[in-house]
Amino acid sequence: MRTAFLIGLLAPLTLTPLHAQEQSDPPWEAADGVYGPEAMREARSRVQNENGDIRYGLAMIDRLEWQDTEGDGTLVWDVQGYYGGDINKVWVKSEGDYSLTDDEVEEAEVQLLYSRAIFPYFDLQTGIRQDLEPDGLSHAVLGIQGLAPYWFETDAALFLSEEGDLTGRMEAEVEWFLTQRLILQPRLEAGLSAQSIEERDLGAGLTDVSLGARLRYEVKRSFAPYVGAEWRSRFGETADLQERLGLETDEVVVVAGLRAWF
């Protein structure tokens, strides 16, 4: 009787390690036994790719707009696109303006950037910027792009030119949905320069600020015309240089354009 009691008491202790070992076996092995190791290896690879290693791309015309500047106006473009995964991407950005009055491109640049996610909502970007107009300078680029608190889309970068000039640019915009299709988009852009660059009419410090708002109607999510207005001002040494050249340091322009993505 006593022997039977001891066996009953010790039996769970002897079975527990075997039970724990069964539970610790990788769950893949069960499927391997049914479908075969080779088939399951391919299935695991596909699942892992579809949950974090998918390659995708986007091309966006953020602004393609006419601005009511003096004379016939100015055409402005701001386009960008990327390709890659959640962590690593390649970005291409381009912006510039074309004067309808002078019938020429006044400013144009292209950036090629490597982008890596460093926080859940921000990417660190580095690469090169090539100015096509006005002077064809090349720059090294270091920037950050992402979604700040309160849904502000931000894009800030420092540019070191091949002549050693350091400049910076910061953009921030937010979307306020008035209806499901009507969206008001305030936008702020500011420029900085670490030194005076007279050939570009730039002084040291804060050079210029643009503050505007655009009201767009999304015919489709990927196609939205808009209208708006923008106030621009030059500051500090940059404003002084503009005044010496007889140029306005403050202006308000009306804009009309298109936002689209593919």
Image (cartoon, grey):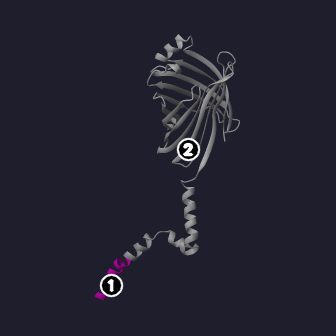
- Asked if residue 41 is positioned above or below residue 162 in the image, the reply reads below
User: Residue at horizontal 49%, vertical 13%?
Assistant: 240
Which badge, 2 or 1, is on the more N-terminal residue? 1
Helix, strand or loop for disc 2: strand
User: Residue at horizontal 35%, vertical 79%?
Assistant: 14
Helix, strand or loop for disc 1: helix
| Residue at the extreme left of the image, as rendered | 2
- Asked if residue 38 is positioned above or below residue 76 in the image, the reply reads below
Label 1 near label 2: C-beta < 8 Å? no
The reply to whether the magenta stretch includes residue 13 is yes
Type of amino acid under label 2: Val
Crowding at mark 2 (Cα within 10 Å: few <14, some 14-19, many 20+): some
The reply to whether the magenta stretch includes residue 17 is no
Q: Residue 2's x, y, as percent?
A: 28, 87
**Where does the N terminus fall, quadrant-wise?**
bottom left
Type of amino acid under label 1: Ile
- Nearer to me, 125 or 58: 125
**Secondary structure mostly seen in the magenta stretch:** helix
Q: Which mark is residue 32?
A: none
**Where does the C terminus fall, quadrant-wise?**
top right
Disc 1 target residue = 7
- Nearer to me, 141 or 46: 141
Q: Is residue 86 left or right of residue 205?
A: right
Residue 7 visible in the snapshot: yes
User: Residue at horizontal 41%, vertical 73%?
Assistant: 21
User: Residue at horizontal 51%, vertical 33%?
Assistant: 139
Magenta residues span 1-16
Foreground tag (2 vs 1): 2
Q: Residue 190's x, y, as percent?
A: 51, 25
Q: Residue 20's x, y, as percent?
A: 40, 72
Q: CA distance from mark 2 to mark 1?
A: 68 Å
Disc 2 target residue = 90
